[in-house]
Image (cartoon, rainbow, N blue to C red):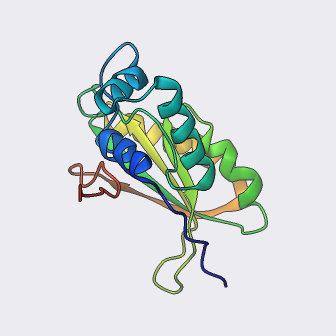
Amino acid sequence: MNAPAEIRLDQTDRAIILATQGGLPLAVEPYHAVARSLGLSAEEVMARLARMKSLGVIRRIAAVPNHYALGYPANGMSVWDVADDRIAALGPQVGALAFVSHCYRRPRVPPRWRYNLFAMVHGRTRDEVGAHVGEIAALLGDAARAHEVLYSRRILKKTGLRLRAE
């Protein structure tokens, strides 16, 4: 397997990453606020972010709400043993459910870990999460051979890689 090509970032790209890596400003026009702080136009900031996203330098620009603060303290990572020949069709359906915040496929690690589909479910109570997991089970049907729910006890990480100013 070939290593990905190195992508060169200039000083302006780095400055934009440093200015936004902790989140966009809470402003009516956040890109304009970033642009003002860097002495750039909002159009340049948006174009550079779009370019870096298309190159894979940044994966996404999205809000990351604190589900505890929003009243959803019951959080369970549901893990599923889904038939490999059906996961490509079923995974996106699970990910599209309103109560699933993220869903992804991961490799199995037999014999210690049989699960290949992960779906994070949020609810106000564990019973609500359990009901949602039941909906996922119904959607997956006989393609799911087993599942578990791993409940969160605390938030472990809500940040990605952080660059340091040089």
Residue 5 location, x and y as percent? Answer: 61, 72
Q: Quadrant of residue 70?
A: top left
Q: Tell me where residue 106 sits by quadrant.
A: bottom right
139, above or below 157, in the image: above
Q: Residue furthest top?
A: 28
Q: Nearer the viewer, residue 45 or 140?
A: 45
| Front-lying residue, 85 or 44 | 44
**Which image quarter holds the C terminus?**
bottom left
Where does the image place residue 161, in percent across and percent down from the top left? 34, 58
Q: Is residue 96 left or right of residue 159?
A: right
Q: Nearer the viewer, residue 41 or 92?
A: 41
> For residue 55, what is the image quadrant?
bottom right
The x, y position of residue 163, in whole percent, is: 30, 57
Q: Is residue 164 above or below residue 100?
A: below
On screen, residue 51 versus residue 23, left or right, reads right
x, y (%) of residue 29? 40, 16
How many numbered callouts?
0
In the rendered image, the vertical position of residue 119 relative to residue 166, given as above or below: above
Q: Quadrant of the N terminus?
A: bottom right
In this picture, residue 132 sits left or right of residue 14: right
Q: Name above or below for residue 98 compared with residue 148.
A: above
Tell me which residue sits at (45%, 54%) in the image.
Answer: 10
Q: Between 64 and 20, which is closer to the camera in this rendering?
A: 20
- The residue drawn where x is 28% and y is 42% is 22
Residue located at (45% from left, 83% from top): 112
Q: Residue at x 24, y 58 (%)?
A: 164
Q: Is residue 136 left or right of residue 9?
A: right
